[in-house]
Image: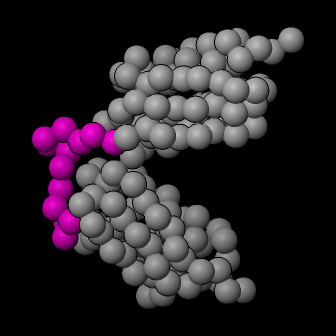
């Protein structure tokens, strides 16, 4: 039988073995039935996403409340204009994203995607394109899907 402790322990073990998360000890994990809560601080938005992915893969986990904060170190910081430029360039390079219909706003490292596309796949691809950029602390995907 899966208990809250065994599920939380399995999530912590998964985080410990994930090379994308170098400081897994900075992540607190708690479980309430099928809900996992992640709290603490990570160094990038990519690490935040990786931690949630790891938690979702554990048997008995149905939902992840990801409250991890992103705290960028000095060399990982970028100006909002730099992030916006890199994000727009990534969208242009991605053949799956109709970049002419997607706009990017950046406020203190938080990226907001706006616009309209024909499929959820295109919206998800745009999200993935910008979420990998260094300097990004979070992404809001406000792209409308209009088939």
**Front-lying residue, 14 or 140:** 140
The x and y percentages for residue 11 are 61, 21
Q: Is residue 118 above or below residue 120?
A: below
**Front-lying residue, 139 or 121:** 139
The x and y percentages for residue 16 are 49, 17
Magenta stretch encompasses residue 35: no
> Which quarter of the figure has residue 121?
bottom right
Task: Please indicate whether residue 1 sits to the left or right of residue 91 in the image.
Answer: right
Q: In the displayed orientation, state which residue is furthest to the front.
A: 32
**Front-lying residue, 64 or 15:** 64
Magenta stretch encompasses residue 78: yes
The x and y percentages for residue 19 are 44, 25
Q: Which residues are magenta?
A: 70-82
Identified at 29% across, 69% down, the residue is 106
Identified at 32% across, 54% down, the residue is 136
Q: In the displayed orientation, state which residue is furthest to the left.
A: 74
The x and y percentages for residue 44 are 34, 42
Visible in this render: residue 93?
no
> Which quarter of the figure has residue 57?
top right
Task: Please indicate whether residue 7 sits to the left or right of residue 37 in the image.
Answer: right
Q: Is residue 23 above or below residue 73?
A: above
């Amino acid at each position: 039988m899966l208990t809250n402790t065994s599920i939380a322990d399995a999530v912590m073990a998964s985080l410990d073995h994930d090379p994308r998360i170098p400081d897994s000890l900075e992540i607190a994990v708690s479980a309430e039935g099928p809900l996992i809560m992640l709290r603490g601080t990570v160094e990038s938005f990519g690490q935040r996403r990786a931690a949630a992915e790891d938690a979702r893969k554990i048997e008995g986990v149905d939902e992840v409340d990801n409250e991890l904060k992103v705290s960028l170190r000095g060399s990982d910081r970028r100006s909002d204009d730099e992030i916006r430029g890199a994000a727009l360039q990534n969208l242009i390079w991605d053949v799956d994203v109709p970049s002419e219909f997607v706009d990017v706003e950046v406020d203190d490292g938080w990226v907001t995607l706006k616009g309209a596309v024909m499929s959820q796949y295109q919206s998800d691809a745009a999200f993935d394109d910008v979420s990998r950029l260094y300097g990004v602390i979070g992404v809001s995907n406000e792209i409308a899907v209009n088939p």
